[in-house]
Image (cartoon, rainbow, N blue to C red):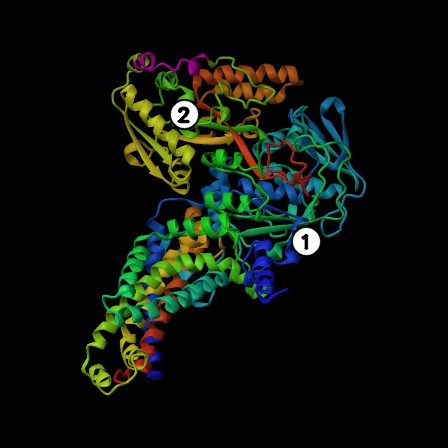
Amino acid sequence: MVGYTVRRLLIAVPVMGIIALIVFSLLYLTPGDPAMVLAGDQATPEQIAKIRTSLGLDQAPHVRFVTWLWQMVNGDLGTSIFSGEPVTHMIGQRLQPTFSLLMLSVLLSVSVGVPFGVAAAAQRGGWTDRALTFFTTFGLSLPSFIAGYAIAFVFATTLKWLPVQGFVPLSDGVQPWLRNLILPAVTLSLVYSAIIARVTRASMLEVLSEDYIRTARAKGVAPWRILFRHALKNAAVPVITIIGIGIATLIGSAVITENVFAIPGVGRLTVDAILHRDYPIIQGVVLMLSAAYVLVNVAVDLCYTLLDPRIRY
Amino acid sequence: MNRRNFLHGTFLAAPLAAGTLPFLGRETLAQRTAAKTLKIIHNGNLASLDPIWTTAPPTKDYGFLVFDQLLAVDSKYAPHPQMAEGWTVEDDGKTYVLGLREGLKFHDNEPVRSADCIASIQRWGARDGFGQLMMKFMDTFEVVDDRKFKIKLKKPFALLPAALGKSNSSQCFIMPERMAKVDPMKQVTETIGSGPYRFLKEEFVSGAKAAWAKFDGYIPRKEPVDSISGGRTPAVDRIEWSFISDPSTAMAALQAGEQDYWDAPTLDLIQVLKGDPNIVVSARNPTGSYFMLQLNHAQPPFNNSKMRQALAMAIDQNDFLKSAVSDPSLIRPCYSYYGGDSPYAGEAGAEIVKVGKLNQAKIALKEAGYAGEKVVILGVMENPVLAAMAQVAEDVMRRMGMNVQLVAMDFATMAQRRTSREPTDKGGWSAFVTVWTGSDIVNPAVHQMLRAGGPTAWFGWPNDPEMEALRDQWANAAGLEEQKKFATALQVQAFKTLPYIPLGSLVQMVAYRKNLTGVFPCPVAAYWNIGKN
């Protein structure tokens, strides 16, 4: 398994290279000039040209790409065109809010989605199953920006139970950290837990129709033991897969949720960078997220072997 | 007390009284410090920390907190001493002697010296339009002592105090000499000023939050505040900016009391905010926002002045302004090339933009020889007001019988495309709607869009030597009356050339909690003097 992990990580290197090339090419083809945005409306063409030169934006694309690639190999993602700060520092400042939001959302989604899916499968056609159908249809069809506004309106604006916006670092205390994250995490979890619940139900139904489950029932094994000990473990592989794939969905939705709840995370950093054409930040963020996604997929693959002894790499 | 009452009292009543859930109780410490912290929802991201290097509005607002100015204009744009004790004019207007107030210090506790002021003026003069104009008159600087210096000119320049004290970007902010010596084309990295608030760089997260602490060493002027002149008193211990890009969230945060002040509430939310008894909505900025239809003078059809005049005759400012906001109290048509509060404001020569008749415009367009040339309007869609006005412009031109295309884009794309002087079928453009503040169009020196030097003019490149000559005459004028004469003549000529077509102005509102004190009218987002009960 160690060999497999190393191989997978090595394969990620050319993948990241290809991603880097694609991101760079897309940005190069996108219209918009950061020097213009940065110089402001009063700048003369000469001043804009000087700024462009000072930022290296007047260099040939291949020169810029090679320079950036070399910096990247050396662990330097460059500096922001606008703030002049290192991109690694800027991403570092935004990681905690996004990571906190994602982790809490995953925790919430799995805590809700898996038990709900198991219960619905156990009572196929019953009220729990019908409730699940309603919940998943609702969760999947409600865009996160509408869900976010609705949840904030009820729990923050009207009931005033929780803050409308903002993020408090964990170092300031668990309570304020949690207070600010609950609403965005619930917003993000709506879709994610609906997907997890649906896949859990489908996978459980398939496993529950297997012969060994029938045998267990015939032997008089307790229903909860059949569900959680025998069925869930064998139904978990597709659930783990969807949790892994869902991380990408979560990252996409986090951009919107961070905006609605004014959380200073990586999503908002990306949107601001795109609007200003701050190329080093866009490139850095996309590469970082791609790397995270690759790592999540490796982790998911490794989880398979823990859940199903038949799977070996 | 029985068991039920006890449980009710401890687990239900207390959290309800606190207005929150039991396991998520609010911090009393935060409540105590909140009274000394002014929390502001700021429009736009603070990216750069150099107000000379960029004219981005958030950086300008940052600059007003951190830095101070030698002089500062009042609400009538008359300059007054700010850091300066005063100034005298010698040598028939060719020498200005400026003295600094005693005890002025930078945030690193170093004294403000003449050398700092001279270096700051030189750096500002290399970047700012008004500064560049001033530098054309400049001969030498001379340090008399640490608190006094002379500005020697080649010929008299009566506008020098107005230039040093101007309120629109870029302002002549005074920095320590080492910062001011940095190449004007590169950003300064330090944040040391001598203004009323110190920037807390360690707390700064670009695009998310910024914070300042009161500078205890700041000595405000004794005079009452009047626009950016007068006493700049730090009235709270700490100022925090949050950058909330979603207007609904910003409004909810203000209503919930999580924030104290919103500097740019969107127009569609003004009525909701006005209905909240805890919120004050006011037009703090007396100058407002001025909208313009910029035309490309380098390409057909608007390289023909007759075409521009025909279009001007078709435009009714009310149609444009009402497309952006339904509240008539926010709408101010403006038939002048200067802002409403400018000393030069007036409607001389403005008859052509008051016609507002489509039939008359159609006839004029035909007489101008319009032959179906394609008109491309660049529409910035991320700004709802600019987007609405671009659509009205398209509609007006279409009804005139023009072959028009509205191209939707974001600001960064427009900022690049508007630099193209190519024909429309090769990536060029014909028109776009833009907006400036009243301070930006207060006089011919700061008014970029009144420049008509062809290739050296602002995007659209109007070419009218007579306008340029009148601007020079205004700059050389001896007193206000003479300046007014040339500024008015310049406007009359501009209405003939039509470098752009004025679309009117909208009142800019701010919204803040009722417990704020000392909010004063100001053309910039100034946060000194604002306290909190």
Horizontal and vertical percent position of residue B231? 73, 36
Identify the residue shown where x is 50% and y is 43%. Answer: B251
Query: Given the current orientation, which residue lies at the most extreme bottom position?
Result: A219
Residue B53 visible, this orientation: no
Are labels 2 and 1 assigned to the same chain? Answer: yes
Figure quadrant of the C terminus of chain A: bottom left
Q: Is residue B265 left or right of residue A277?
A: right
Contact flag, marks 2 and 1 (Cβ < 8 Å)? no
Point out the frontmost of discs 2 and 1.
1
Please name the amino acid that badge 1 sits on.
Arg
Q: Is residue B59 left or right of residue B235?
A: left
**Mark 2 residue element:** helix
Please name the amino acid that badge 2 sits on.
Phe
Q: Tell me the quarter of the picture where residue B338 sits.
A: top right
Rendered view: B390 above or below B317 = below
Q: Tell me the quarter of the picture where residue A128 sits.
A: bottom left
Q: Which mark is residue B320?
A: 2
The stretch of residues the image draws in magenta is B351-362
Q: Which mark is residue B32?
A: 1
Assess disc 2: are there few (<14), some (14-19) or many (≥20) residues with their C-alpha within 10 Å of its C-alpha. many
Horizontal and vertical percent position of residue B216? 75, 48
* Disc 2 from disc 1: Cα separation: 47 Å
**Mark 1 residue element:** helix
Q: Tell me the quarter of the picture where residue A15 sits.
A: bottom left
The reply to whether the magenta stretch includes residue B375 is no
Of residues B54 and A294, the one nearer the viewer is: A294
Of residues B308 and B433, the one nearer the viewer is: B433
The reply to whether the magenta stretch includes residue B358 is yes
